[in-house]
Image (tube, rainbow, N blue to C red):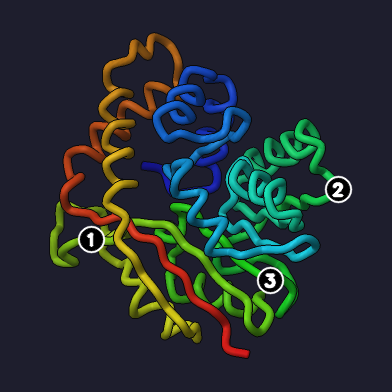
């Protein structure tokens, strides 16, 4: 799987031309009909994330590694918060900006190019940070988490969804997943009140998504062909990972 900005630019460009892939993801994951997802957080998980963030009208959410901005925009619509979306793919940021306009949320959304470990935001400038299924792509996971802490105000909260290896020595699992250990890494980055919770129900929905993707006729749809390639790769090591939701706060 590509991990470069250029690779993700191509990936997002292909995805925007594939209503089949978007329909499949929304239906199987149980997402709102107008939410454009490029991650694997389902509707039930999104509800949990919204509760964990506990945002109020006028507060600021950093949607870090936001992709097309779907989750951040939905949270802004539900909570009344402002969303700042940061992603290293300029193509994804352009798509997110257009989507904010289409949804009538442009006045509460700011999307910009940046990195997991270098957002370009000021210190203590946001009330909450969300990273959906992306922190594993940071070259240094600890640096990315330290950046989250830097931009959060005292008392602010980070909410992360991702995967961790059941056995960090299992070479069949991608290295980026074997490097994840949020129960240890979040305190090392300066966070308190750390909770990392297994989400087996989310994992079962993911499995159903990958299985159904392999049954579809991709024809000449590059996004579906890419999804099927990823499905075969993911299913080959599926039992080596656990799905987690992590929350933590910045001490006051």
Residue for badge 3 = 127
Secondary structure beneath dot 3 equals strand
* Residue 60 occupies quadrant: bottom right
Q: Is residue 85 left or right of residue 159?
A: right
Residue for badge 2 = 107
Residue 118 image position (x, y, % from top left): 62, 68
Secondary structure beneath dot 1 equals strand
User: Mark 2 near mark 1, Cβ–Cβ under 8 Å?
Assistant: no
Q: Residue at x 76, y 57 (%)?
A: 82
- Earlier in the chain: of badge 1 and badge 3, it is 3
Residue 193 vertical placement versus 247 (above, below) = below
Q: Residues within 10 Å of mark 3 (few under 14, many from 20)?
A: many
User: Mark 1 near mark 3, Cβ–Cβ under 8 Å?
Assistant: no
Residue 195 image position (x, y, % from top left): 39, 74
Residue for badge 1 = 165
- Earlier in the chain: of badge 2 and badge 1, it is 2
For the C terminus, the image quarter is: bottom right
Q: Is residue 135 left or right of residue 96?
A: left
| Front residue of this view, candidates 140 and 245 | 245
Q: Residue at x 58, y 28 (%)?
A: 33
Residue 210 vertical placement versus 185 (above, below) = above
Q: Is residue 157 left or right of residue 189?
A: right
Secondary structure beneath dot 2 equals helix
Q: Residues within 10 Å of mark 2 (few under 14, many from 20)?
A: few
* Residue 250 occupies quadrant: bottom right
């Amino acid at each position: 799987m590509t991990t470069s900005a250029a690779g993700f630019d191509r990936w997002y460009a292909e995805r925007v031309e594939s209503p089949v892939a978007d329909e499949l993801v929304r239906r199987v994951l149980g997402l709102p009909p107008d939410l454009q997802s490029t991650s694997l957080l389902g509707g039930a998980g999104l509800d949990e994330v919204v509760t964990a963030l506990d945002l109020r009208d006028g507060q600021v959410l950093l949607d870090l590694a936001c992709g097309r901005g779907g989750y951040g925009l939905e949270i802004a619509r539900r909570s009344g918060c402002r969303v700042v979306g940061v992603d290293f793919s300029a193509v994804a940021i352009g798509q997110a900006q257009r989507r904010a306009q289409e949804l009538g949320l442009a006045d509460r959304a700011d999307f910009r190019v940046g990195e997991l470990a270098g957002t370009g935001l000021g210190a203590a400038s946001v009330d909450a940070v969300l990273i959906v299924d992306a922190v594993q792509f940071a070259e240094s996971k600890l640096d990315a988490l330290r950046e989250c802490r830097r931009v959060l105000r005292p008392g602010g909260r980070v909410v992360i969804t991702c995967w961790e290896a059941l056995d960090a020595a299992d070479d069949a699992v991608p290295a980026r997943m074997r490097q994840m250990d949020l129960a240890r890494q979040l305190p090392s980055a300066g966070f308190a009140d750390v909770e990392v919770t297994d989400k087996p129900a989310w994992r079962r929905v993911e499995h159903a998504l990958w299985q159904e993707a392999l049954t579809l006729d991709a024809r000449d749809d590059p996004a579906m062909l890419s999804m099927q390639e990823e499905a075969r790769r993911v299913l080959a090591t599926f039992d080596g990972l656990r799905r987690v939701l992590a929350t933590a706060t910045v001490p006051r």
